[in-house]
Image (cartoon, coloured by chain):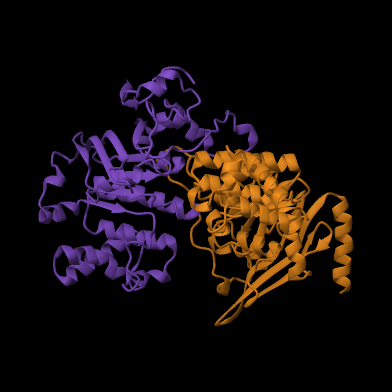
Amino acid sequence: MSDAPILSVEGLEVAFPGRRKGQVIKAVDKVDFVVRQGETFGIIGESGSGKTTVGRALVCLIEPTGGSIRHFSDNPFALSRRALRRHRRGYQIIFQDPNAALDPRMTILQSVREPLDVARIGSHHERTRKALEALDHVAMGPEMAARYPHELSGGQKQRANIARALVLEPQLIVCDEVVAALDVSIQAEMLNLFADLQRDFHLTYVFISHDLRVVAHISDRVAVMYFGKIVELGPATAIMSAPLHPYTKALLSAEPEPVPAHLRNRERVVLQGEVPSPLDPPTGCRFHTRCPLAQAECRAREPEWRELAPGRFVACHFAETPH
Amino acid sequence: MSVAAKNISDSEKAASDGVLLDVRDLCVSFRDDAGWVRMLNNAALTVKRGETLGIVGESGCGKSLTALSIMGLLPKRGCRRTGNIIFDGNDIAAISEAGMRQVRGRQIGMVFQEPMSALDPVFTVGDQIAETVRTHFPVSQREAKERAIEALASVRIAGPANCATQYPMSLSGGMRQRVMIAMALVCEPKLLIADEPTTALDVTIQAQIMELLLELGQRTGTAILFITHNLGLIAESCERMITMYAGEVVEDGAVEAVLQRPLHPYTAGLLESLPGRRAPKSRLSSIPGRVPSPREMPEGCRFAARCTYITGPCAATQHLRAAGDRHVRCVRADGLALAGSGT
């Protein structure tokens, strides 16, 4: 694992125009983090937290409205269209819906070869060979390659999508809810596959999910997002065993545990209320409307993003207070 | 005929023992171009009064089909249902559609995964709940409205009178699901069938909705048949659980006992494949292969092709049999000593 960050994100902001004139919705509001080469960086958040928007911005599918994203030391948004197209090969993304990237009229082989066709890499024969190789890496044999998407199960389609991302030999893959639509037994298989591919191809992952257990299992470090901001960032094991932010704590306790009652020795924090409207964000700390610990200060002043212990970042006025 | 009569008298006895719902030998087949294919095979389950029973299984194993069969909501054409569904002493599998309409909503309430598909977008939430009340009780329009507002208050919606005037579109997913629960419970049914009620919701909202469901169930004495793919939810909310696989019930027992020591290798496999129970980054165990398609269902054990404990007797048809106060559809269950999540 090298120390040069493959991704550095500083003060990232993504705003969308609202329905009315002049209205602005900040989907991502001043987010900072780095992703190191070879690691798996997890992003957890509920719907509306901005996790998907961050993921898309990382691979240049959305242009930030503020702050910067660097791939090593390059600013990909400064590249010409042509140069960006070439640059993008190294930074792939896989989505939740396995059907989204597969054309129903193309065989799996054609779909997996398509990125190479578009990039005009090698001869037709070489592209086919590469596509078959990529399919082989995700345990899909030549008999699968000849099939159409409707002939495959959800898990197999997701494998094809992984092959489609792999065929361009990327350095980094953003995985956005890639196992959310799969049954648990298939999900386990896929998580194992992601681990194998990372080892074999020295891949870096940004793994986005709403499922805390999935993210914690696969990630080295985890960022917890709430309402457009990262509220906590740290090593996966530390976040799971000793969360600093009350939102992280609530998320952990809300996750139902499939174990007998005597092993479930924890009090549950059931958050009241729902995520506020993005058109009318709360003042101060954005979590204060639902936070069980909220004080007057939380309503008045936005907490700073600070490093509480080495590698453990949090944005909460009361992160030191045991809760 | 005599068999049916015997069943009913059995069920009368069972009803006095506190059994509210007793499903026996439930089979459902669908017809396609190639003929009839059986999707649900001899499903059997009982729900006691006031009890919460969970059904777990992966997609396509027959959980939702079981729920739809109980409610009589299967398509009229190209679908065949056999077996007995004895609810509160009556075989509701044998009654007419008109009779069933008296049961649905009044005796058996329902909550589905996607509230938007169950709510009518052109009526206000209050009108929809009031309509449910007026369908089953001879009350005035005004009283029905009042009951609707009370129901919305009971699911802890702040400003229930205001919420009653809203259209479903303007509510969040969590609020819609509260409205669904209010509508399902407004007639105080004896049984609530909740099919993946929180699957589309965020985990913090899921926790709110589950707390609400269980509390209301307890307060009104409503039994809950809770269908989910989430073993964690079953562990935290149910007294008994059923595992379904490939259209069959494969295990049935008290939740604590099943989690401690599952009897069927499929239940054990489901528990094993969950991330979070093993060290981070370690290998997860998975269940190899796929559920056999209904057209290619094997003669013997339906799980055999994916099972690590397969031996000779697995080639024979497996029957759901008693194992103490539990049931299992596995010939090897007694000798396996499978690990649960409590070990």
Rendered location of residue B342, percent (x, y): 61, 38
In depth, the one of A25 and B1 nearer the eye is: A25
Across and down, in percent, residue A317 comes to 39, 20
Please determine whether, in this image, residue B120 is positioned above or below residue B258: below
| Residue at screen point 59% across, 49% down | B268
Task: Say whether residue B159 is visible.
Answer: yes
Residue A205 visible? The answer is no
**Left or right relative to B188: residue A18:** left
> In which quadrant is the N terminus of chain A drawn?
top left
Residue B232 relative to residue B4: left or right: left
Q: Quadrant of residue A302 in the image?
A: top left
Q: Chain B is drawn in which colour?
A: orange
Q: Residue at x 22, y 43 (%)?
A: A64
Q: Residue furthest top?
A: A321
Measuring from the top left, give residue B24's x and y in whole percent.
76, 63
Q: Which of B318 and B334 is in front in this view?
A: B318
- Given residues B332 and A269, the one toward you in this image is A269
Q: Colour of chain A?
A: purple
